[in-house]
Image (cartoon, grey):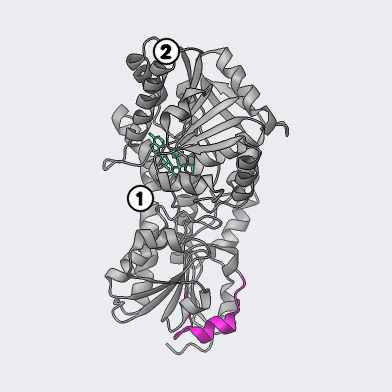
Amino acid sequence: MRLTMVGTGYVGLVTGVCFAGTGNDVTCLDLDPRKIESLKQGRCPIYEPGLEELLERNIKNGRLRFTTDATDAYKHAEVIFICVGTPSDSAGHADLKYVMAAADDIAASFIRFPGKTRTVVVKSTVPVGTTLKVRDRIRAAAPQAKFHIANNPEFLKEGDAIIDFNKPDRVVVGVENEETGELFRRLYEPFVRNGHPIYIMDILSSEMVKYASNNFLATKISFINEMANLCEAYGADIAKVREGMCADKRIGSAFLYPGLGYGGSCFPKDTLACIAMGQSAGVPVSVSQAVHDTNQRQRDRFFARIESHFGATLKGKTLAFWGLAFKPRTDDVREAPALTLIAKAISAGATVRAFDPVASETARAELGPAPAIFADMYEAAKGADALVICTDWDDFKSPDFDRLGAALKSRTIFDGRNLYRPDEMSRRSFTYFSVGRAARPGSADTR
Ligand SMILES: NC(=O)c1ccc[n+]([C@@H]2O[C@H](COP(=O)([O-])OP(=O)(O)OC[C@H]3O[C@@H](n4cnc5c(N)ncnc54)[C@H](O)[C@@H]3O)[C@@H](O)[C@H]2O)c1
């Protein structure tokens, strides 16, 4: 099939590359000329394991191309996927300006190139009812155009995006007729050979599946953090509580890791969008509100602990940060806890030295010149009064503790991802703070 991705970000690029991989002829459109130029050269503008190899292979075999020219991108398309961003606006609603601008471009191309029936698919995460608004907008601008509308939410996780897209737990598609449902069965059939289901449903339910899924996962994270905070208050150990609790098959263990809370481009904005949808419809959404509030508080709480360790002031202190990306195996720093903590540390008077295995550039663009970002994790730790761990990259899981201890001015670690065992850290003479477990002074603490 001839497919066009509108928006070549995390979702549009992964979707385009993977559909090209199963033999489709894919054009990826974006407004950003630098992104498109780099992709044309086979260089991936984002860090995503496995993506660059697939990109090169599909460019070489002629099934994947990139353009900034909307006319060119839409002219031959049979199926058009809208994959543009839907960030939160100032009131927490999903901002649909990019989606609607894409709809206008599509309508204009339908007027210029009338002819065969096309399918327009909203893949961006959008509030319930948006896909039908896109349909009506195109219809109003191009009344003669023949097209089907569909919603196809994306469930990939950054860091595992290729695996998730190629072997999805499920594919969800909202359609208005059986013909469109059949088209999606054909398109996704190569990806569900493992027997995983394709759910074809109405468009409103399909849109809601995405919000319900993300909101539920965010709820798990805020829930375990709330339990971790109770553990701290009462001297219990969240690691043990987690084990005992997660052995129950009804509960499971995924997304139940205590830490700094969720970040990224999806959970924060999708939780806010659910709250905004509830408010607009007059439906109480107190669980979603609590999930959001707990998540925001978790960062503040962690920072307050750092401050109180230093006697309520960070003036003149140096903090080293390991991990800038919102989670491992990505360079995405959108809503990353590290960025919040670094901004707070700088405004409290601290000097910040930082390291991330892949997110230095994206973080630099957000943080500006103030924090020094190093290419080596031990160099970042040099002379610091404490190390703050914000992302659970594998690189940090078994560091050379002697080297780390020698680099730090004070052997103090604030671990926002619970990477180490408190008793071991104490034995190694580190003063060690983690989440939901009792703080441990180093056995030779000299603070
Ligand atoms: N990132 C994820 O992990 C993920 C997972 C599932 C769903 N989603 C959803 O998918 C959507 C896209 O997310 P993303 O992270 O890929 O966004 P992104 O910001 O990485 O990419 C969006 C791209 O769209 C381009 N764009 C905007 N308007 C355009 C237009 N009119 N024509 C062509 N290009 C245009 C932008 O230049 C940008 O490159 C969002 O709704 C998001 O919630 C994201």
Instruction: Sort mark 2 into few (<14), some (14-19) or many (20+) by Cα contacts within 10 Å.
Output: many
Q: Position of residue 335 (x, y in %)?
A: 39, 53
Instruction: Sort mark 1 into few (<14), some (14-19) or many (20+) by Cα contacts within 10 Å.
Output: few
Q: SS for tag 1?
A: helix
Q: Amino acid at mark 2?
A: Ala
Q: Earlier in the sequence, mark 2 or mark 1?
A: 2
Point 52% across, 81% down: residue: 430
Point 35% across, 79% down: residue: 310
Side of 3 relative to 131 (left or right): right
Asked if labels 1 and 2 touch by Cβ distance under 8 angstroms, the answer is: no
Point 41% across, 52% down: residue: 334
- Give the foreground label among 2 and 1: 2
Q: Amino acid at mark 1?
A: Asp
Q: Looking at the image, is 430 positioned above or below residue 135? A: below
Task: Work out which residue is located at the far top of the displayed protein and give it.
Answer: 144
408 magenta-colored: yes
Q: CA distance from mark 2 to mark 1?
A: 45 Å
Q: Looking at the image, is 429 positioned above or below residue 263? A: below
Please give the residue where the numbered disc 2 appears in the rendered image: 145
Q: Position of residue 191 (x, y in %)?
A: 67, 33
**Magenta part of the protein: which range?**
398-413
Ligand 1 is found in the corner quadrant, namely top left
46 magenta-colored: no
Q: Position of residue 304 (x, y in %)?
A: 34, 68
Please give the residue where the numbered disc 1 appears in the rendered image: 293
Viewer-nearest residue: 301 or 415? 415
Viewer-nearest residue: 161 or 169? 161
Residue 169 visible from this viewpoint: no
Q: Position of residue 46 (x, y in %)?
A: 50, 51
